[in-house]
Amino acid sequence: MAYLKNMLNKIIIHQQLFILSLLGFIFLNTLIPADLVNPDYLIWTALFLVSSIGVSHGALDGKLIWYGINKNIQRFTLFIFYLLFVLSGWMLWISFPVIGLTLLLIMAVFHFGNADLRFLKLADINIKLSWGFTMTFLPILFKKDIVLSIFYNLINTKISETLIVIIYCILILSIVRIYWFFVTNFLNSKEKSVWYEDKNILLLSEFTLLILLSYLVHPFIWFAIYFCGLHGLRSLIDSKFMWRIDLKWIMIFTLPVLIFIYFTHGKYWNSDNYSIIFPILGALTIAHMSLPTLINHIKKLAYD
């Protein structure tokens, strides 16, 4: 009970800081003329953030492997399976990019919704799916042409207008569903807390500012801010992250990603090929989401 209370306090502090950061970023974005900022530098920065801070919460998979299994031979076996899942995900992208992108988007809907709202007891599967769908597809609401261009660069295939209309409809319904859920929760809540510590108000503020931000900035910059600032850091809090102990796991798992991106695409960098990060995220996400199941299977085999 004490742990849950401590984690909720950390999440509330994170929400407050994230909201203040969003307000500051939006203010600067409207204050500084667009022609004074090189868009390539912004996207480079976003790519670095996604590849480091964003990937870092998945980098703690090494910690889960080490402490989730007792025997070294089982740890080694689990790590090999983990790498095979990453390699399989990467090969899927290379061989069948349409399937790879589709799988990544579906996994993102489930993963973002479950991870971002895990601390919210009243959030059922429907609200989590609505949140996950919104965080996955929100940039398409205001920057459709740019998002479709990113998708085309990834899969070399045009997305049908019918599918875009379906995504739009589900997205609008998801946004309405989220607002209705948090507003009614706030009005019906029996908890007495000041407004700047109320989780419903904080989540509504985060949500509203992210929608506004998606209107103002490039989709990849929006994704970097959400993926690193909200999703990544909240997942680190949920995993009881401690700098001194866990930094080594981040270094072990994150540095290879940065080195891979640099040597495969660093020499040919321009503002159109940053999408290399998505196949990497897709491969890592398959392994990341499969890890709890892998750990359970390894433990079960050990007891059989």
Image (cartoon, grey):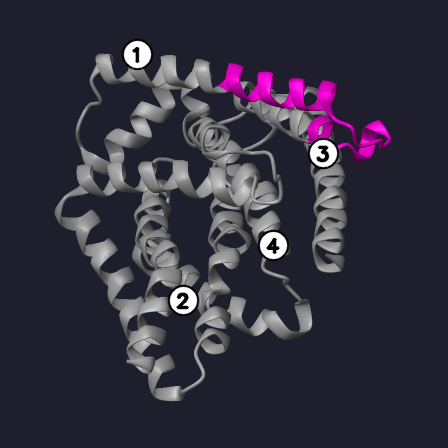
Start and end of the magenta stretch? 175-202
In 3D space, how far apart are the residues under numbered discs 2 and 4 (Cα atoms)?
24 Å
Q: Residue at x 61, y 40 (%)?
A: 121
Q: Which is more foreground, mark 2 or mark 1?
A: 1
| Residue type at tag 3 | Lys
Report helix, strand or loop for mark 3: helix
Q: Which residue is mark 3?
A: 199
Residue 51 is one of the magenta-drawn residues: no
In 3D space, how far apart are the residues under numbered discs 2 and 1 (Cα atoms)?
39 Å
| Callouts 4 and 1 close, C-beta under 8 Å | no
Q: Residue at x 85, y 31 (%)?
A: 192
In 3D space, how far apart are the residues under numbered discs 4 and 1 (Cα atoms)?
35 Å
Q: Is residue 199 above or below residue 68?
A: above
Q: Nearer the viewer, residue 193 or 54?
A: 193
Labels 4 and 3: the sequence-earlier one: 3
Q: Which residue is mark 4?
A: 238
| Residue type at tag 4 | Asp
Q: Residue at x 55, y 54 (%)?
A: 53
Labels 2 and 4: the sequence-earlier one: 4
Q: Quadrant of residue 169?
A: top left
Q: Residue at x 72, y 56 (%)?
A: 1
Residue 187 in the image: x percent, y percent?
73, 18
Residue 178 in the image: x percent, y percent?
55, 22
- Left or right placement of residue 120 versus residue 55 in this view: right
Labels 3 and 1: the sequence-earlier one: 1
| Residue type at tag 1 | Val
Q: Which residue is mark 1?
A: 165
- Left or right placement of residue 26 versus residue 164 in this view: right
Labels 3 and 2: the sequence-earlier one: 3
Crowdedness of circle 4 by 10 Å Cα count: few (<14), some, many (20+)?
some
Q: Quadrant of residue 217?
A: top right
